[in-house]
Image (spheres, coloured by chain):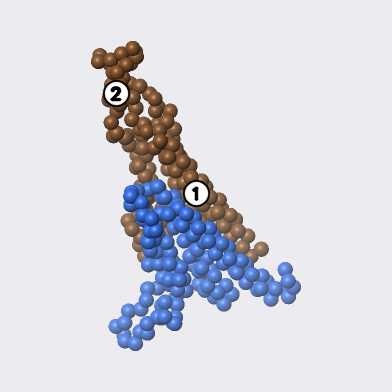
Amino acid sequence: MNIKSDALLGNHAQALQIWQQRAELLSSNLANADTPDYLARDVDFRKALSDATGQGNGDGPLSMAATQSGHIGGNNASSAGSDAVAYRVPIQPSMDGNTVDTQVEQAQFAANAVHYQASLAFITSSIHTMKTAITGTSS
Amino acid sequence: MSLLKIFDVAGSGMAAQSTRLNTTASNLANADTLSGSADTAYRAKEPLFSAAMKQSRGTQSDPESASGGVNILGVTESQAPIDSRYEPGNPLADADGKVYSSNVNPIDELVNMISASRSYQNNVEVMNTAKQLMLKTLDLGK
């Protein structure tokens, strides 16, 4: 699934995809809460979104200018690249090497679900705006 | 659609935790089992979990491989020493009049039971949330 950002949906489509992948990672963390030596991971949302929208790719405010032919451009990741996935710094590491803090993961998962629904709401309102513009009546 | 994968991940977590609950139930039920020799005495069973994922972070081309569920590598038997006691009247006693009890520690088992139960509930919550998000996504634009 790869929806390029456009004038209608903005970057909410990409954000939705990243929230989705983050939900998957956090669910993996929660499922492995009792697995020895499992290292909890999370998505760096800012990095993932700038990768996905191409802002870190030459035209964003924080990108480096390629002034010579030998300069290498940023990676052209169209989804939340694995670069944005990092290991969580444990607050209370346990003796079996597991770094999942169930409460932290639960809180992050809940917040992630709310963010996902917020992105959905933004997309829905964009669609409603467009519908109103097409039909001339508020649906 | 990675929301669908959450069902697999949480499902594997639930399967792992229910295996753990199963072994706990077996251990508690057999906590007072006696046996005629140390070899046949009941030993506490413990499931061995491992993360079902590709090494470290997954590849650039397939970032979704970075997450995964839980594998149950197997069920191991506790190597804690078996208690023996002198009970010549017991029909199971060996030639020396000894019977061998299990090496189950009921306190450990109760702790395991609570932990498994909580982890199972966590996975159920994750699955419920994923289901709600998917249903909301299906309603997109309405």
Give the percent coordinates (x, y) of residue B132. 58, 54
Q: Residues within 10 Å of mark 1 (few under 14, many from 20)?
A: many
Shade representing chain B:
brown
Is A125 left, or right, of B109 in this rendering?
right
User: B83 above or below A42?
Assistant: above
Task: Please tell me whether residue A12 is drawn above or below residue B29 in the rendered image.
Answer: below
On-image quarter of the C terminus of chain B: bottom right
Instruction: Identify the residue at horizontal 42%, vertical 43% (top origin).
Output: B16
Would you say residue B66 is visible in this rendering? no
The picture places residue A42, in percent across and down from the top left corner, at 42, 61
- Between A20 and A29, the residue placed more toward the observer is A29
The picture places residue B136, in percent across and down from the top left corner, at: 60, 58
Chain letter tied to blue: A
Q: Secondary structure at mark 1?
A: helix
For this orientation, the residue located farthest to the right is A137
Numbered mark located on residue B136 in the image: none
Residue A114, quarter of the rendered image: bottom right
User: Circle 2 is placed at which residue position?
Assistant: B84
Query: Amino acid type of disc 1?
Result: Asn
Q: What whole-number distance in Å separates the C-alpha atoms at marks 1 and 2?
A: 40 Å
Mark 1, residue position: B122
Q: What kind of residue is marked 2?
A: Ser
Residues A59 and A69: in front is A59
Question: Which residue is at 44% across, 80% downward?
Answer: A60
